[in-house]
Image (cartoon, grey):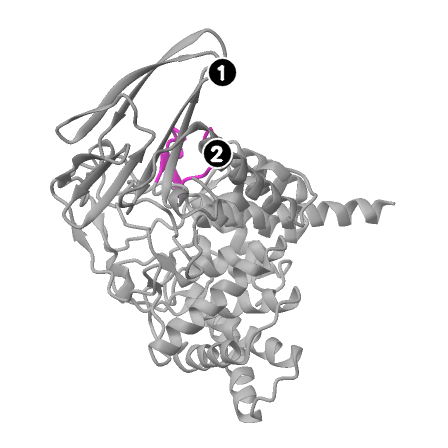
Amino acid sequence: MPRTVHPQRRNGLFRLAVCRRGKVGVRVEVEPRFDYGASPARWTRRGGCWEAAAGESRAALRGAAGLAADGGRLEGAVELARGRCLPLAFVFGARAPRPLDEDEARESLRETAGFWRRWTSLARYDGPRRAEVLRSALALKALIYEPTGAMVAAPTTSLPESLGGARNWDYRFAWVRDTSMVLEVLDRLGYGRETAGFMAWLTRVIRRDRGALQIMYGLRGERDLAERELPGLSGYADSRPVRVGNGAYRQLQLDVFGEALDTAWVFEKSGGVLTGAEWEVLAHLADVACARWREKDAGIWEVRGGPRHFVYSKIMCWVAADRALKLARAQSRAEPEERLARWRAAAREIVESVTTDGWCEAKKSFAQSYGSDALDASVLMVGLTGMLPPDDPRVVSTLDAVLRELGDGPLVARYRSADGLAGAEGSFLLCGFWAVELLTRMGRLREARERFDALLALAGPLGLFSEEIEAKTRTALGNYPQALTHVGVIYAAWTLAKAERDARAARR
């Protein structure tokens, strides 16, 4: 996937087949389908290239010597001698592209490799598992849509949470939560430019919508993400339905305010500069969180069983107030005392509410929602956000309860309670990395390291992680690669590396 300033090389996939010795036959088949498989391509030979069209959609194959069209397919065979290269580029949205030669293809490869090597060289991380941390950072960077600064939660739709099941969702949108978490970890690694781009995008979207904030948008800021099913597609492993769009965009999820403020706080701590317009938007989000934290919502997991008082949502509303106060103090921002007092009061009230109404005495744990005895891995955030210290007995007891009831080896399920949806799901990988991070903050380093290494072993052959894992078979489930899982890798590695350095220093 080229990183280049040349317009002919953008928005495409390059393939370079090189013969290292002797001779080799290469067979090429190209069969694109537009409109989610409903429209086969019509091929036209033009200017030394093949162009594919279906309605308003266009694509082109460059470097297509020796191929012939057969209906919606291009196919052919080429024999390469030693040292020769067959370059191909499938370019989207192109009209009348130039032919592709070997020199241009090799130059594009050099440019792309050079870009990524320069980018990874900037990473501020020298701890254990550096290769895995950089691989996760690369995956996250590649999910960002650079023209706007937004990013997809995953580049796929409808990969199932259980094989043959119906929990199949479209993740090709920009969740405020997911993007905030991603940019926060990238900022910790030294990539402030990406965070600045997201803050500018978020500011534009909120100001355009007159202060309103959805939980998710299209990559260009689209608001309407209506969900529909594609009955003509059988889905991965016969997992129906295949969905396009995501109806969760209409949900109220109060945690997004805290995630946005937390990202801004990390950005500013690392030397980033928020503009006046960005601070105005962030202060508005803190106001909304402090005004609405008592409401029920759909929670982080976007359950479809009706709104509840989710503990995680309350925790993140506290984060919104807490980080807004820290941001105001950090740059001596001239906020009215009445506003600051409102944020302070809300922060105190939320802590009291969570520690009283969110606690389940029977389980010795914070619960998924008020009045419930169901557990949820997201409540581990009570000790990861700073609401309570990690060594608080309630935090320790909560982690032990979550691992006991939701754990399976190094894996941790999100929850096991009813959520308004049919079928089952796998263990959520992010939750396993949350457990590693909290164990580390508690000083249980050996246990944290063992869990961390076991989780890293579940990566695919390219070092990428899915959303979930089936505990018994270790089968990857859900959309892939999943941004939040790679966020978990980096957070856990960063926290564990720092704790191990501090432990070594203390022994000297």
Residue 41 image point, x, y percent: 17, 37
Image point (33%, 77%), residue name: 209
Vertical placement of residue 123 versus 205, above or below: above
Which residue in the rendered view is the most extreme toward the right? 508
Name the secondary structure under disc 2.
Answer: loop
Q: Would you say 346 lies left or right of 217 here?
A: right
Residue 76 x/y as whole percent = 25, 19
Magenta segment: does it hold 479? Answer: no
Q: Quick one: 76 or 124, which is closer to the camera?
A: 76
**The quarter of the displayed image where residue 331 is located:** bottom right
For the record, the magenta segment spans 458-477
Q: Quadrant of the N terminus?
A: top left
Amino acid type indicated by mark 1: Gly
- 386 and 107: which one is in front? 107
Say if 74 sits above or below 184 in the image. Answer: above
Which of pointers 1 and 2 lies earlier in the amino acid sequence?
1
Residue corresponding to mark 2: 459
Residue placed under numbered mark 1 in the picture: 83
Amino acid type indicated by mark 2: Ala
Mark 2 neighbour density, 10 Å: few (under 14) some (14–19) many (20 or more): some
Figure check: 199 above or below 404:
below
Image location (x, y in percent) of residue 252: 32, 69
Label 1 vs label 2: CA separation? 34 Å
Q: Which quarter of the image is occupied by the C terminus?
A: top right
Mark 1 vs mark 2, foreground winner is: 1
Determine the residue located farthest toward the top in the rendered image: 22
Q: Taking 102 as reference, is 210 above or below it? A: below
Query: Magenta region's main secondary structure?
Result: loop
